[in-house]
Image (cartoon, helix red, strand yellow):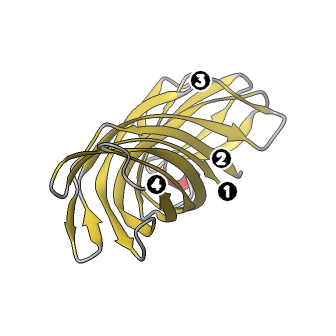
Amino acid sequence: MKKYLIGIAFVFISVSVMSQGVTGGLYISPVISWLKPDSKNITKDGSRFGFGFGIPVDFNFSKNFAFSTGIAYTNIGGNLKYADSIPKFETVDSTYHLVPGTAIKYKTSFIEIPLSLKGKTNEIGYITYFLKAGISPQFRFKAKGDISVNSGDNLDIKAEVRSFNMGYHIGGGIEYSLGGSTKLLVEALFTNGL
């Protein structure tokens, strides 16, 4: 079954340092995510709050444009409710037969390597505005699930979650100059899995 992952992340703190057209930093962000089923017999049953952190790097190829990448760890997931039975739902330890009405809470973690193009304004006062869009290759780090009917909590469900997911992202935000080459970054980012 193909699943869609959609997340919204707000980057709270990112301190950047600049060296010869390359900027980098650290960030921490809360994440709200949910799953979008591709079957009429499966419905969304709630979102999941998680977090992410990472190291963003911008390669500035002009004053207003950069290639943005980095590495990130993100907790995402959501809840799905199954209208039909599932004869074979596999975990690492066993196989379950799920009855109609079963709800599963997916708790997944991914390593991401976002690749995007970033456009930014000239500095206005201490603030620079930016927009970015690109792709987000995601590699599954772990996948846990809580199954409502079987009272299974924190089951290892790697067999039911793809090990690789490709998504796209679009977002924007502001960089606030703290002096010199140090900046505080606030960003809103929408990511959709393919």
* Amino acid identity at mark 1: Leu
Tag 4 near tag 2, CB within 8 Å: no
Residue 54 image point, x, y percent: 29, 54
Task: Classify 187 as above or below 102.
Answer: below
Tag 1 near tag 2, CB within 8 Å: yes
* Camera-nearest residue between 23 and 35: 23
Rendered residue at 47%/41% (across/down): 76
* Amino acid identity at mark 3: Gly
Extreme residue in the right direction: 40
Mark 3 and mark 2: span between their CA atoms? 14 Å
* Camera-nearest residue between 149 and 154: 154
Describe the element under mark 2 as helix, strand or loop. Answer: strand
Task: Report if residue 107 is visible in the image.
Answer: no
Q: Which residue is mark 4?
A: 121
Q: Mark 4 against mark 2, which lies toward the viewer?
A: 4
Q: Which residue is mark 1?
A: 194
Mark 3 and mark 1: span between their CA atoms? 20 Å
Task: Report if residue 129 is visible in the image.
Answer: yes
Q: Which residue is mark 2?
A: 4
Describe the element under mark 3 as helix, strand or loop. Answer: loop
Sequence-wise first label, 4 or 2: 2
Q: Which residue is mark 3?
A: 46
Rendered residue at 38%/72% (across/down): 60
Sequence-wise first label, 3 or 4: 3
Rendered residue at 35%/56% (across/down): 72
Can you tell which quarter of the image residue 104 is in? top right
Mark 1 and mark 4: span between their CA atoms? 30 Å
Describe the element under mark 1 as helix, strand or loop. Answer: loop
Mark 3 and mark 4: span between their CA atoms? 37 Å
